Amino acid sequence: KATIEDFSYAGRRCQLLMCSDGATEITAKEGGLIGHDGLLSRARLSGADNLFDRIIAAIDNELDGSQPADDIALMVVQCAPPKARTIT
């Protein structure tokens, strides 16, 4: 028998965002790199329905039609509430 435990933040559903440096090293319109905090704060302003689409909209808005200087990879993982189950 093996017990698999799933963990979550504060017992709620949560999301894990993973991205390459190409997403955080975009030059902001006001200068400097947007960074992790800048990417997330811009995503919060987007009207898209889910986190992935909000991140894409934030990147597209910041690039304003130009090509990114580096490749961009994104992954959003939906984390479920905790529960334990036994596998036999």
Image (cartoon, helix red, strand yellow):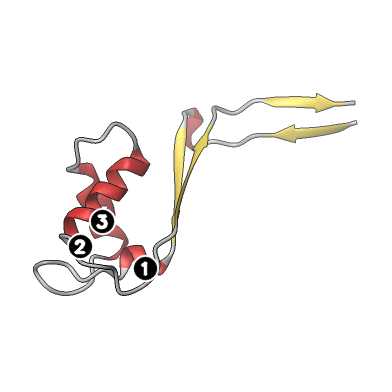
Image-based side of 19 in relation to 1, left or right: left
The structure residue drawn at horizontal position 34% and vertical position 63%, both measured from the top left corner, is: 23
- In this orientation, which residue lies closer to the viewer: 77 or 12? 77
> Quarter holding the C terminus?
top right
Instruction: State the quadrant of the N terminus.
Output: top right
Horizontal relation, residue 30 to residue 43: left or right? left
Q: Is residue 82 left or right of residue 48?
A: right
Q: Give the residue at x 32% y 65%.
A: 24
Residue that carries the numbered disc 3 in the rendered image: 59
- Identify the residue position indicated by label 2 in the image: 63
Q: Which residue is mark 1?
A: 22
What type is the residue that disc 3 sits on? Ile
The local secondary structure at tag 3 comes to: helix
For marks 1 and 3, the one nearer the N-term is 1
Q: Position of residue 67 (x, y in %)?
A: 26, 68
Mark 2 and 3 residues: CB-CB less than 8 Å, in contact? yes
Amino acid type of disc 1? Answer: Gly
Number of numbered discs? 3
Q: Secondary structure at mark 1?
A: helix
Decide: few, some or many residues near mark 2? Use Cα within 10 Å; few <14, some 14-19, many ≥20.
Answer: some
Q: Nearer the viewer, mark 1 or mark 2?
A: 2
Q: Position of residue 20 (x, y in %)?
A: 43, 64
